[in-house]
């Protein structure tokens, strides 16, 4: 069971915006996260990953406490090992496609499978500057999955993909996550794209 109850005060211009999120989800489920721009969806993912500290509350993943303000527990991102697909991709300019995946994983067969799923096998020796926006986004997704994380956090992961590629990638990921029992949180502005993928929904914002 995933049990999260956290809050933090965000700065929004000259105002302060309370972010209070409660979520319970089954292991192996996919949760679609919706809400208006600036409501704190990305901040929520970063708090779960350990990149931003909540003001209070707790984060419990599969009976393991990742964060609990009341008893002073706050695991580092390295200890949590959550996969994170950043909205801006956060790729390394001097690494090839394959190097992005092998940086955190030395399983050659697994890397080859991911490259096949993402349609990037023929570009495995290319650096990000030679990839299209959609190809860069697919690489960001594959890199997050390569470590086989307990929890995968995705921030607008399909925004640069055309309709055909988006459907192909989602179909392949759905099968992969089911096989691995992955638990996934996906921030998206488009409810329809996840209608056959997500089993839960979370709204963040007023």
Image (tube, helix red, strand yellow):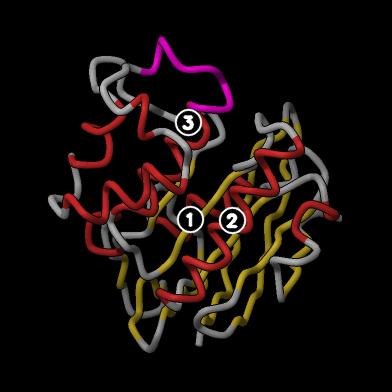
Pick whichever, 137 or 164, lies toward us: 164
Of tags 3 and 2, which is closer to the observer?
3
Local crowd size for mark 1, using a 10 Å CA cut-off: few (<14), some (14–19), many (≥20) = many
- Main SS of the magenta part reads helix
Residue behind mark 3: 89
Give SS at disc 2.
Answer: strand
What whole-number distance in Å separates the C-alpha atoms at marks 1 and 2?
Answer: 9 Å
Q: Which residues are magenta?
A: 128-135
Are the residues flagged by discs 1 and 2 in contact, CB closer than 8 Å?
A: yes
Q: Earlier in the sequence, mark 3 or mark 2?
A: 2
Give the image location of residue 161, x and y in percent: 66, 33
Question: Given this view, does label 3 or label 1 mark the residue nearer the observer?
Answer: 3
Identity of the residue drawn at 38% across and 18% down = 128
Residue 70 is left or right of residue 26, and the answer is left
Look at the numbered discs 3 and 1 and tell me whether their residues touch, using CB distance below 8 Å: no
Q: Are marks 3 and 2 in contact (CB under 8 Å)?
A: no
Q: Report the residue that reaches farthest toward the top.
A: 129
> Which residue sits at x=40%, y=74%?
180
Is 157 on the left-hand or right-hand side of 144? Answer: right
Q: Which residue shows up at 30% across the image and 28% down it? A: 124
Q: Mark 1 falls on what kind of element? A: helix
- The C terminus sits in image quarter: bottom right
Earlier residue among tags 3 and 1: 1
Cα distance between the residues tagged 3 and 1: 18 Å
Q: Which residue is mark 1?
A: 47
Whole-percent x, y for residue 83 in the image: 39, 54
Q: Earlier in the sequence, mark 1 or mark 2?
A: 2
Residue placed under numbered mark 2 in the picture: 8
For numbered disc 3, what is the local secondary structure? Answer: loop
Give x and y (percent) for residue 15: 76, 35
């Amino acid at each position: 069971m995933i049990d999260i109850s956290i809050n933090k005060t965000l700065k929004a211009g000259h105002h302060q915006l309370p972010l209070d999120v409660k979520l319970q989800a089954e292991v192996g489920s996919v949760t679609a996260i919706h809400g208006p721009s600036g409501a704190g969806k990305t901040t929520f993912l970063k708090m779960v990953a350990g990149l931003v500290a909540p003001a209070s509350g707790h984060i419990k993943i599969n009976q393991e406490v990742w964060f609990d303000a009341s008893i002073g527990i706050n695991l580092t991102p390295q200890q949590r090992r959550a996969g994170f697909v950043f909205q801006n991709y956060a790729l390394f300019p001097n690494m090839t496609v394959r190097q992005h995946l092998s940086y955190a994983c030395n399983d050659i067969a697994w890397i080859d499978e991911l490259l096949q799923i993402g349609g990037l096998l023929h570009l495995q020796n290319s650096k990000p500057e030679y990839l299209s926006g959609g190809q860069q986004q697919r690489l960001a997704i594959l890199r997050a999955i390569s470590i086989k994380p307990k929890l995968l956090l995705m921030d607008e992961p399909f925004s640069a993909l055309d309709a055909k590629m988006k459907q192909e990638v989602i179909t392949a990921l759905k099968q992969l996550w089911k096989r691995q029992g992955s638990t996934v949180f996906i921030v998206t502005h488009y409810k329809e794209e996840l209608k056959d993928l997500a089993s839960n929904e979370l709204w963040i914002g007023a």
